[in-house]
């Protein structure tokens, strides 16, 4: 077995496929006495509804961010999925239609870097044609590193994409190039953000992963830059997703510290959540009277390490080759590709997804908080680059 030494933590990591094998769909899904049909009221063991579906369209990315796809693991020898293994656009749309029947109202396309998937606009067109049981259009969004956004913004908008979220971990070019680890300039991402704004792919969200000792000095410059821009800047705690990023708790900068730092220069006022299941705690820029200055906008903080929000999580994740994951920190997913490429009817798919969600009890962040982040041996969880953030 080949091994490589991680340059930051000196860990020795085996070069292997980071994708875990799939779980079998519960047999009860196909028993005539226990089959389920979609009625939009599906809930799990903790009464959490299914409202949000994240779809990964590729396991490839042109960045090698050390918190997601470190170069030491995802190098030239990494066994990426073959094209035949990927769900086709038609297969994705068919599954999405079933999820919508179960109550999904929002679909986010992710990766890897989703804009690397050839002809992605065709998938967006297909998804945009879907309607909820009430006849409403879906909220179709996409998360991207922004590297291809300048050239793709107009075609994405024309295809029916409504909003984009752009990952941007700093404004200093040296810091940004170091974090993406492929020497990609920050100016090109900023150009992509402006192009998306110009064609109306908004409101745009800007996601900054904060890793202590690496880019916390970029917090205030980012807050200054996007204040009043009509874009929502969100700071994300460095997470222990997967097993390849060498996560350590001492590299996590709690969101409370981020808010305190910003408030030292730019006064903030806490806002109410925008909807149930919101991952980000909202803070608005305050005016001279201490009220939210709507023209100045807001920021968000996502505290997935220090403040678990499992209680109202309404998100499911569909991997590039059809594995259904019920949590960002999951160990395994359920194999839907074998169903859709077999002789499964739409009714079969409805029952399968219904039984999977009804049995969901995932609450990793709550358990981590209760036990402590450094308790026990590390668990090999699915990589974020495989199912998206």
Image: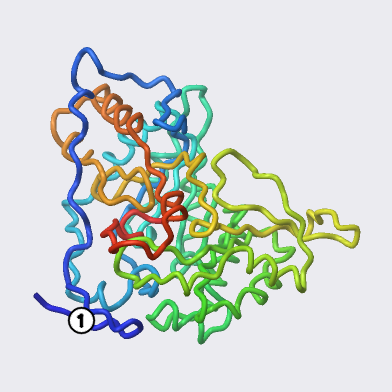
Q: Residue at x 44, y 34 (%)?
A: 50
At 90% from the left edge and 62% from the top edge, which residue is drawn?
A: 288
Q: Nearer the viewer, residue 217 or 85?
A: 217
> Residue at 70% across / 58% down in the picture?
298
Label 1 SS: strand
Place of residue 256 in the rendered image (x, y in percent of width and height, measured from the top left):
63, 63
Q: Is residue 157 above or below residue 313?
A: below
Q: Decide if residue 287 is on the left or right side of residue 224.
A: right
Q: In the picture shown, does residue 135 fall above or below 76? A: above
Coordinates of residue 4 in the picture (x, y in percent): 20, 81
In front: 52, or 365? 365
* Other-residue count near label 1 (Cα within 10 Å), few / some / many at <14 / 14–19 / ≥20: few
Q: Quadrant of the C terminus?
A: bottom left
- Point out residue 20 in the picture as x, y percentages from the top left corner: 20, 54
Name the quarter where the N terminus is drawn.
Answer: bottom left
Residue bearing the label numbered 1: 4
Q: Residue drawn 57% across and 53% down?
A: 201
389, 145: nearer the viewer: 389
**Residue 164, x across and y down, in percent:** 52, 55
- 224 relative position to 341: left or right: right
Taking 233 as reference, is 217 above or below it? below
Judged from this view, the residue extending furthest toward the top is: 33
Give the quarter of the image for residue 217.
bottom right
Q: Residue furthest right?
A: 289
Q: Residue lying farthest left?
A: 1
- Relative horizontal placement of residue 298, taking residue 286 as reference (left or right): left
The colour scheme applied to this rendered structure is rainbow
Q: How many marks?
A: 1
């Amino acid at each position: 077995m080949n091994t490589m030494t991680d340059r930051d933590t000196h860990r020795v990591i085996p070069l292997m496929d980071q994708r875990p094998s799939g779980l079998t769909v519960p047999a009860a899904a196909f028993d005539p006495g226990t089959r389920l049909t979609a009625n939009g009221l599906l809930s799990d063991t903790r009464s959490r509804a299914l409202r949000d579906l994240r779809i990964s369209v590729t396991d490839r990315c042109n960045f090698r961010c050390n918190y997601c796809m470190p170069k030491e693991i995802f190098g030239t020898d990494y066994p990426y999925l073959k094209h035949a293994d990927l769900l086709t656009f038609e297969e994705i749309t068919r599954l999405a239609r079933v999820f919508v029947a179960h109550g999904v109202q929002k679909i986010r396309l992710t990766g890897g870097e989703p804009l690397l998937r050839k002809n992605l606009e065709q998938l967006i067109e297909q998804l945009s044609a879907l309607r909820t049981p009430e006849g409403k259009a879906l909220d179709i969004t996409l998360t991207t590193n922004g590297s291809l956004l300048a050239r793709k913004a107009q075609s994405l908008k024309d295809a029916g994409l409504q909003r984009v979220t752009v990952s941007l971990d700093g404004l200093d070019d040296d810091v940004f190039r170091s974090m993406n680890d492929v020497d990609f300039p920050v100016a090109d991402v900023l150009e992509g953000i402006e192009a998306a704004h110009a064609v109306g792919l908004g409101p745009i969200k800007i996601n900054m992963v904060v890793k202590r000792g690496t880019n916390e000095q970029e917090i205030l410059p980012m807050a200054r830059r996007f204040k009043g821009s009509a874009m929502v800047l969100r700071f994300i705690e460095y997470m222990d997703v997967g097993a390849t990023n060498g996560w350590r708790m001492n590299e996590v900068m709690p969101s409370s510290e981020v808010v305190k730092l910003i408030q030292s220069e730019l006064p903030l006022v806490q806002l109410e959540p925008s909807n149930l299941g919101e991952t980000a705690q909202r803070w608005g820029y305050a005016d001279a009277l201490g009220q939210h200055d709507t023209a100045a906008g807001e920021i968000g903080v996502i505290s997935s390490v220090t403040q678990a929000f499992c209680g109202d999580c309404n998100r499911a994740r569909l991997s590039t080759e059809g594995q259904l994951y019920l949590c960002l920190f999951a160990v395994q997913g359920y194999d839907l590709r074998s169903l859709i490429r077999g002789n499964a009817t739409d009714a079969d798919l409805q029952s399968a997804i219904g039984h999977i969600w009804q049995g969901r009890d995932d609450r990793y962040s709550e358990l981590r908080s209760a036990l402590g982040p450094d308790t026990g041996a590390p668990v090999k969880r699915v990589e974020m680059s495989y199912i998206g953030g």
